[in-house]
Image: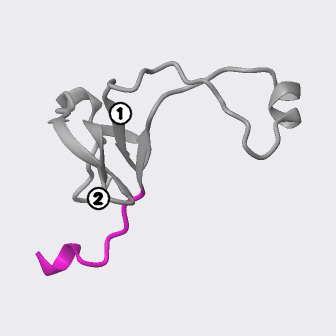
Amino acid sequence: MGVFDNIAVDISVVLGTAEMPIHQLLRMGRGAVIELTSREDDDVKILANNIPIARGQVVLQGERVGVSVTEILIRAPEARPVRHDGPV
């Protein structure tokens, strides 16, 4: 497993999305609230390098916010990147 120690993966958690005109976004100030498409109890999307890998629930542990993984997403073989082991 030591081979994987230095591989960086960008993990993102998506709570929801919103669509608005750019002029409205530019007028927002500190403390503005953006209404999202999801509700409080909806699953969040967990992405690794912008690829969906799991779903989860937001959990609060004291002052900290975390995500509890509830489902691992399995990618179909045709959606996986093509791997080249030898000369092309």
Q: Residue furthest front?
A: 62
| Front position in the image: 26 or 61 | 61
Which residue is label 2 attached to?
Answer: 87
Answer with mark 1 or mark 2, whichever residue precedes in sequence: 1
For this view, does 75 lie left or right of residue 20? left
Mark 1 element type:
strand
For this view, does 42 lie left or right of residue 28? left
Task: Please name the amino acid that badge 2 sits on.
Answer: Pro
How far across and how far down the image is residue 12, in percent?
43, 48
For this view, does 20 lie left or right of residue 9? right
State the extent of the magenta-drawn residues as a range.
1-10
Which residue is label 1 attached to?
Answer: 44
Task: Please name the amino acid that badge 1 sits on.
Answer: Val
How far across and how far down the image is residue 5, in percent?
24, 77
How far across and how far down the image is residue 60, in percent?
31, 49
Mark 2 element type:
loop
| Front position in the image: 32 or 54 | 32
Residues at marks 1 and 2 touching, judged by CB atoms closer than 8 Å: no
Packing grade of label 2 (10 A; few <14, some 14-19, many >=20) is few
The answer to whether residue 53 is above or below residue 5 is above
- In three-dimensional space, the C-alpha distance between marks 1 and 2, rounded to whole angstroms, equals 41 Å
Q: Nearer the viewer, mark 1 or mark 2?
A: 1
